[in-house]
Amino acid sequence: MNKTPEQMRAQAREYRELHRHLTGTVLSEAIEQVALALDRSANALEAELTGTD
């Protein structure tokens, strides 16, 4: 998976938008966890690309 940090963040936003249209606690939590993981991955990749931690 070769995505830029911005692409990962866009995907996280898409998951959150999907979250708004679905109901159910377990599904909602799972979608939010995926979005958070994408945000963390984007931050880590960005730090790696800029040489910061």
Image (tube, rainbow, N blue to C red):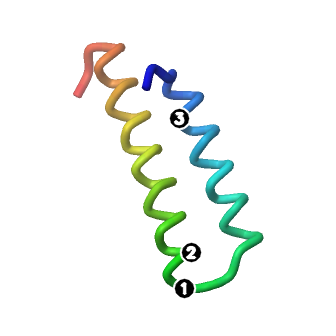
Question: Residue at 32% across / 24% down in the picture?
Answer: 47
Question: Quadrant location of residue 50?
Answer: top left
Find residue 48 and report its horizontal and vertical position in percent: 29, 20
Comparing 24 with 49, the one in front is 24
Please name the residue that numbered disc 3 is placed on.
8
Q: Could you tell which of marks 1 and 3 lies nearer the N-terminus?
A: 3
Please name the residue that numbered disc 2 is placed on.
28
Find residue 6 and report its horizontal and vertical position in percent: 57, 28
SS at circle 1? helix
Question: Residue at 47% across / 68% down in the picture?
Answer: 30
Q: Is residue 31 left or right of residue 52?
A: right
Where is the C terminus found, in terms of image quarters?
top left
Q: Is residue 32 above or below residue 44?
A: below
Which amino acid is tagged 2?
Answer: Ser
Local packing at callout 1 (Cα closer than 10 Å; few below 14, some 14-19, many 20+) is few
**Tag count in the figure?**
3
SS at circle 2? helix
Find residue 3 and report its horizontal and vertical position in percent: 50, 23
Q: Residue furthest bottom?
A: 25
Q: Is residue 18 left or right of residue 29?
A: right
Q: Is residue 2 left or right of residue 44?
A: right
Whether the residues at callouts 1 and 2 have beta carbons within 8 Å, the answer is: yes
Question: Residue at 36% across / 26% down in the picture?
Answer: 45
Please name the residue that numbered disc 1 is placed on.
25
Q: Could you tell which of marks 2 and 3 lies nearer the N-terminus?
A: 3
Which amino acid is tagged 3?
Answer: Met
Question: Quadrant location of residue 19?
Answer: bottom right
SS at circle 3? helix
Where is the N terminus found, in terms of image quarters?
top left
Q: Residue furthest right?
A: 21
